[in-house]
Image (cartoon, rainbow, N blue to C red):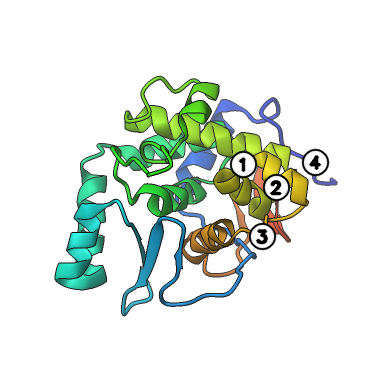
Amino acid sequence: MVPRKVTNETRSDSDRKVVLHRFCRISFVLAILLGAGSRISAGEITTYKDQNGRTVYVNRDDRELRSAVDRGGSAAALRVIQQRKRGLPAIDEYIDQVALLHQVDPNLVQAVIEVESAWNPKARSRKGALGLMQLMPETAARFGVRDPFDPRENVEGGVRYLRFLLDRFHENLKYALAAYNAGEKAVAAWGDVPPYEETRTYVQRIAMIYSPGHLQEDLSASVISRSIQGNRIIYTNLD
């Protein structure tokens, strides 16, 4: 049978449970690397890479993380990030749940959080972005977030915004991420990633930790396949 596109209407509750079980083990290609370096400076974040190749992002306003880097380098910063995650009970499971509901890869959500706030639920940027996914106040209000510093509300709003951007740009990950940083109007006006150093570096940062290689994997042994073709996410039914 010819594969058909899967929609929320065609997916059963049992299918959703199977997808959720396997979703958290999947990472996908973000084939949009704009060049890589061990340390990059743009906007408000400095990038470090440890000896194992793990990338750590430090917001210049994040005094705790900057202090950790000064004391013990990337390893110390990673310990701070893990401590922050442990202070957010069941956050991984919640991200999986919300991401599945809105058909957004939870690994992408986690990558955005790590780059945006390094898992600090009380993060506030100099531009006014708030919380785990660094929502601007107007974006938070637009997607029904009353308290941007509430981790779960912030994740819900951030995932809904990512879903909106993926729909807006026809599942093009590069454009959706650029719009998350620079705004959808800027991406629409340029018809591409805007030529802003901060935005291009932001997209690169996400790419560096989102997926190291090309992967296609079934989300259900008999029901759903999800893959990337170019920069687009493709859902198909295997029946």
- Residue 16 falls left or right of residue 86: right
Q: Amino acid at mark 1?
A: Gly
**Disc 3 from disc 2: Cα separation:** 10 Å
Dot 3 crowding, Cα within 10 Å, few <14, some 14–19, many 20+: few
**Disc 1 from disc 3: Cα separation:** 13 Å
Q: Amino acid at mark 2?
A: Val
Residue 110 in the image, given as x and y percentages of width and height:
43, 49
The quadrant in which the N terminus is found is top right
Label whose residue precedes the other's in the sequence (3 or 2): 2
Label whose residue precedes the other's in the sequence (1 or 3): 1
**Disc 4 from disc 3: Cα separation:** 37 Å
Residue beneath disc 4: 4
Residue beneath disc 3: 195
Q: Nearer the viewer, residue 223 or 75?
A: 75
Residue beneath disc 1: 183
Examine the rendering and report whether any part of residue 228 can be seen: yes
Q: Residue at x 44, y 23 (%)?
A: 145
Dot 4 and dot 3 residues touching (CB under 8 Å)? no
Q: Amino acid at mark 3?
A: Pro
Q: Considering the numbered disc 2 on the image, is that residue within a helix, a strand or a loop?
A: helix
Dot 2 and dot 4 residues touching (CB under 8 Å)? no
- Residue 2 falls left or right of residue 129: right
Q: Amino acid at mark 4?
A: Arg
Label whose residue precedes the other's in the sequence (2 or 4): 4
Q: Residue furthest right?
A: 2
Query: Depth-wise, is mark 3 or mark 2 nearer the camera?
Result: 3
Dot 1 and dot 2 residues touching (CB under 8 Å)? yes
Q: Residue at x 40, y 19 (%)?
A: 146
- Residue 188 falls left or right of residue 97: right
Query: To which quarter of the image does residue 123 belong?
Result: top left
Residue 201 in the image, given as x and y percentages of width and height:
53, 63
